[in-house]
Amino acid sequence: MTDTVLVINSGSSSVKYQLIQPDSGQQLANGMVERIGEDSSTATLKVGERTLRREGRVADHDAALRLAFELSAEAGLHLDDLDLVAVGHRVVHGGKTFYRPAVIDDAMMSKLEELAPLAPLHNPPAMVGIDVSRRILPGVPHIAVFDTAFFHDLPAAAATYAIEHDVAEKWHIRRYGFHGTSHEYVSRQAADFIERPYDSVNQIVLHLGNGASASAVADGRAVDTSMGLTPLEGLVMGTRSGDIDPGIVGYLCRTADMTIEDIDTMLNRRSGLLGLGGENDFRKLHELIENGDAAAQLAYDVYIHRLRKYVGAYLAVLGTTDIISFTAGVGENDAAVRRDALSGLAALGIELDPELNESPSRQPRRISAESSPVTVLVIPTDEELAIARACVQVVRTA
Ligand code: AMP
């Protein structure tokens, strides 16, 4: 039998799940239940070349996970017959308490509950997923893998906000960073790709998906990252603003008759590319730009400008940079973003090879010129595989 891990990523209205054999990296199944709680829910499951699909209302997360297991069985993957050694759960915020992957017990659940205000959009739905799957699969260890873990040991100078010390202390305000599983996975893959030991290279990782974040990794340790107390800080994202003057919040509160909730929702859900250009998907944004849409062009320009600023900042933080990697939906697929993020930086040791940059591939690949002192890579991220591997490590060392 081969060790198999079920990885669950539970959002507010969707559950994504994969069955993975961590040792070989083989993905047995990849499924998703979307629009939970609506009449138009859909469930899909891909097993090899086969895709199963169900439509119709899925009332809640309990029903969603039960349906997921039903579809798996229909596809010939009965959980009882697989050597399921763990269920891995992606948990966005571990606060100050949690960073190492750990087996979930009732005590952890109640501590996670206390952390909910730190990540109100992400942690509560993950906890619903954990709660339901612990009930459905009680005989298997459930393991939490935290998105903040990789950044737990950021140097104090990078982790600390310059705000009143006592307030920060009392309310656990620091820069936590997110997408850590991806930043660690990609930076390790990148070091492997250039055949250098992980702890001997300096890297910048640009995780550009619907959410986006950058990190600086020196000798295998994260030394800075663009997301902060929440995943709102940093780069311009699909629907999030990234960095803004914090004075905007007070100003809107006082003058625009907006509540804190209104402002929070605007900054998280109606800002970024969507707020500026009307589209948060780069494929559609490019179409608008091609048709002369000025707002879409401005959204793109603001996105690129912010990205270049972070690249510049991290080149300075690192001093010497060996690798810059692009990953996630935009980073892996959008050659124009990669080109514009790094154009004109030959003086800083960064030279793309236009042909390599344009050629699409699903594999890790170099896109910099042979002569470029900084190697630029595209490394497909695989957070689920990284979570599955973290889980077997916990199980095998227990
Ligand atoms: P992720 O959050 O990593 O799944 O990334 C999702 C985002 O990736 C989408 O919103 C798109 O903006 C972007 N994306 C996905 N596929 C492509 C593509 N082929 N070309 C450009 N952007 C893409």
Image (cartoon, rainbow, N blue to C red):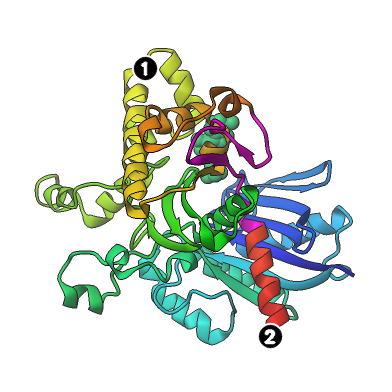
Q: Secondary structure at mark 1?
A: loop
**Residue 293, numbered label:** 1
* Residue 364 inside the magenta-drawn segment: yes
Residue 252 locus on image (x, y percent): 15, 47
* Residue 343 inside the magenta-drawn segment: no
Q: Determine the main secondary structure of the stretch shown in magenta.
A: loop
In this view of the protein, can residue 1 be seen by the observer?
A: yes
Binning the other alpha carbons within 10 Å of mark 1 as few (below 14), some (14 to 19) or many (20 upward) gives some
The answer to which of 180 and 296 lies nearer the viewer is 180
Specify the amino acid type for callout 1. Asp
Q: Residue at x 68, y 74 (%)?
A: 393
Q: Residue at x 57, y 60 (%)?
A: 198
Q: CA distance from mark 2 to mark 1?
A: 57 Å
Q: Name which quarter of the figure residue 396 lies in.
A: bottom right
Specify the amino acid type for callout 2. Ala
Q: Is residue 150 left or right of residue 26?
A: left
